[in-house]
Amino acid sequence: MVSMTAFIAGIKERFESEKGATMVEYGIMVAFIAVLVMAAVIILGPEIAGLFTQVSNAIP
């Protein structure tokens, strides 16, 4: 009986835990950072490519 009560208390504790919410928050932050990096690459990519082209053309 005691082990069954402990088992039920353990399951109840797992459902009341906030680990899942924290993981979701970290996932949202990582997704937001990925979107920002992709936007920066799309916006700055052609300018950086142009700079590399100028440098490579300047080298004899």
Image (tube, rainbow, N blue to C red):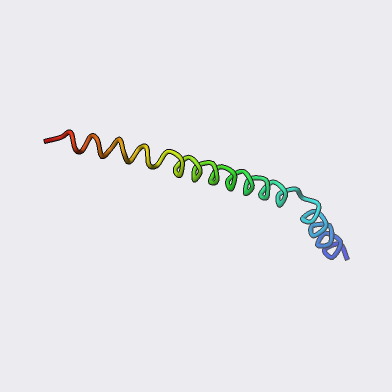
Residue 23, position as x, y percentages in the image: 66, 49
Q: Quadrant of residue 59?
A: top left
The residue closer to the viewer here, 40 or 30, is: 40
Q: Residue at x 32, y 41 (%)?
A: 49
Say which of 56 and 22 sits in front: 56
Occupied quadrant, residue 44: top left
Position in image of residue 56 (x %, y %) = 20, 38
**Measuring 79% from the left and 57% from the top, which residue is drawn there?**
10
Q: Residue at x 11, y 36 (%)?
A: 60
Percent coordinates x, y for residue 29 in the rendering: 62, 43
For the N terminus, which image quadrant?
bottom right
Q: Residue at x 51, y 43 (%)?
A: 39
The answer to whether 40 is drawn above or below residue 11 in the figure is: above
* Figure check: 14 above or below 44: below
* Residue 40 placement, left or right of 56: right
Rendering coords of residue 47 (x, y %): 37, 37
Looking at the image, the residue that sits furthest to the left is 60
In the image, 26: left or right of 12? left
